[in-house]
Amino acid sequence: MNTPVLTFFNNKGGVGKTSLIYHLAWMFASMRKRIAIIDLDPQSNLTAAFLEEDQIFDIWNSKQEGSTVFQCVKPLLGVNDIARPVLQKITADLYLLPGDVALSRFEDTLSTEWPKSLDTNLYRPMRIISAFWQVMQQAADTIQADLILVDIGPNLGAINRSVLLSTDFVVIPLGADLFSLQGLSNLGPTLIEWRDSWERRLDHWHSSLEKKEHPGFLLPLGEMKPIGYLCQQPILRLSKPIMAYDKWVQRIPSVYREDVLKERPVPEMRQENDPYCLAIIRHFRSLVPMGQEHRKPIFNLTPADGAIGSHAGAVQEARKDFKLLAEKIAGKIGMTV
């Protein structure tokens, strides 16, 4: 049985996606769920949140097979097969497969092999396109993970297409602005197109002679089921009234239904009442740099870290918020917590 893959994705950046994954990974681990975190964003911001810079430098400099996502798939650029992933243990129930800025080198290969996967010689193209899924499942198998959490960059390129094909569930983080709304509008049709394209390739593979030559070769289903969206609470400024944010926020329920789910919008549906809205994420302002300084999630900050007075109350609020969000996501993907 394969471990479920949950990816957070929007092709609009700056929506707090990496911070969300970081905090949810810690929260799930605190609930005794074993989590494999896969950093598939070539910028590797999630890796930087978990590991010290010297540690990352040593991992990248060693170029050890399987030590990063890129070092796992790099052998496919030659004549070898995927290298088994080597995970970094963060806590007893939290493991990371580090990202790698060199991962961008794999993008051209994925782009080249995509059209070839509809030709007659299928195995190598399908092996390369599904490489991320193979790596994820090997990583999860190594630690007996309950869930795989994935971070990717804000674009619609070949790397992200292969990651989404490997994904069972998708959460879409959004900001309270026009650009996030447009990103949501672009993302929905793209997910549908990728899903349909992958179904054609799976049908082609299952009817091919090569499948009989590789009976143990498994492929992802490419379901990428959207389970909801998250919206970042706007930072209110005196120069910009709240109505300017609300105008875009209240369009999200309709755009999500029409462009992502292909459903009819619900008249007068507001975001705060929308069942597809998993949470409205608060900023927690000065807690964030405090958490970054001490390399821990904001809900684990203590008075020794400087979380005193009003900060101590905000820490407890953050814990409640992320616990509720983790429980809601677990319910959507059928995972018991």
Image (spheres, rainbow, N blue to C red):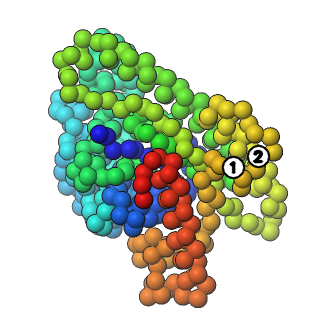
Which quadrant holds residue 234? bottom right
Residue 9 seen anywhere in this rendered image of the structure: no
The tag on residue 269 is 2
Q: Which amino acid does label 2 sit on?
A: Met
Relative to residue 193, is residue 337 depicted above or below? below
The tag on residue 274 is 1
Q: Which amino acid does label 1 sit on?
A: Asp
Task: Return the x and y of residue 15 as percentages of the image width and height.
Answer: 58, 54
Which quadrant holds residue 285? bottom right
Residue located 49% across and 73% down the image: 299
Residue located 64% across and 30% down the image: 262
Residue located 20% across and 31% down the image: 78
- Mark 1, Cα crowd under 10 Å, few <14 / some 14-19 / many 20+, is some
The answer to whether 175 appears left or right of 103 in the picture is right
Mark 1, secondary structure of its residue: loop
The answer to whether 88 appears left or right of 240 in the picture is left
| Furthest residue in direction front, as rendered | 336
Relative to residue 53, is residue 165 depicted above or below? above
Q: Dots 1 and 2: beta carbons under 8 Å?
A: yes
Residue 77 seen anywhere in this rendered image of the structure: yes
Task: Return the x and y of residue 248 as percentages of the image width and height.
Answer: 75, 49
Alpha carbons under labels 1 and 2: distance apart: 7 Å
Residue located 40% across and 27% down the image: 111
Viewer-proximal residue, 100 or 212? 212
Please give the count of numbered marks on the rendered protein: 2
